[in-house]
Image: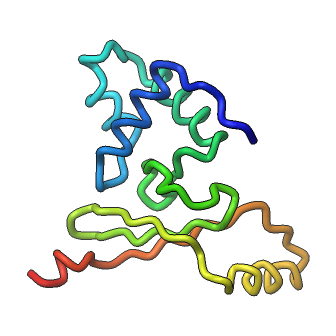
């Protein structure tokens, strides 16, 4: 998919996500963007949907929140290490075993369209405390 030019709202949402080390909910984003003129949740949700379609943001399902893509292949499987203490989210490219997981699911007749792995625990900083 070719990257399209971002609308003002899309750019604002992407910038706030890129500036945050933690995943942000749509309402977190709305609170952070009120001074920029965003007033309705639908403005944020539309921007997130378009950014997701372009592979620029990821939804962290377990948190119902979003992060900016760190730059690896947006169509590859993504992995996220989520600190349950401070909320920091670190994205990583999923290792080669991705195909193994797809083939395990395929053996049961399941067709995998995308894969996201979420690891919950403590980041290095929180683990040292």
Write the residue at 34% across / 28% down: 30
Q: Quadrant of residue 93?
A: bottom right
The residue under the point 61% across, 81% down is 95
Which is nearer the eye, 42 or 37? 37
Q: Is residue 9 above or below residue 67?
A: above
| Percent coordinates x, y for residue 96 in the rendering | 67, 84
Image coords of residue 8 (percent x, y): 46, 19
Q: Is residue 78 above or below residue 125?
A: above
Quadrant for the C terminus, please.
Answer: bottom left
What residue do we see at 88% from left, 85% from top? Answer: 107
Is 39 rendered above or below residue 114?
above
Front residue of 109 and 22:
22
Residue at the image point whose x is 58% and y is 66% from the top: 78
Residue 51 locus on image (x, y percent): 57, 37
- Tell me if 116 is positioned left or right of 120 in this view: right
Q: Is residue 46 left or right of residue 54?
A: left
Looking at the rendering, which quadrant does residue 1 occupy?
A: top right
Q: Is residue 43 above or below residue 118?
A: above
């Amino acid at each position: 998919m070719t990257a399209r030019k971002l609308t003002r709202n899309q750019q604002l949402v992407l910038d706030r996500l890129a500036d945050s080390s933690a995943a942000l909910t749509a309402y977190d984003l709305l609170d952070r963007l009120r001074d920029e003129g965003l007033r309705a949740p639908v403005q944020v949700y539309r921007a997130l949907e378009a950014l997701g379609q372009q592979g620029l943001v990821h939804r962290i399902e377990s948190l119902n929140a979003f992060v900016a893509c760190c730059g690896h292949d947006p169509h590859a499987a993504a992995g996220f290490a989520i600190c349950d203490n401070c909320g920091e989210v670190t994205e990583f490219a999923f290792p080669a075993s991705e195909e193994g997981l797809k083939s395990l699911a395929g053996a049961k007749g399941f067709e995998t369209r995308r894969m996201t792995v979420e690891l919950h625990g403590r980041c290095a900083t929180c683990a040292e405390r």
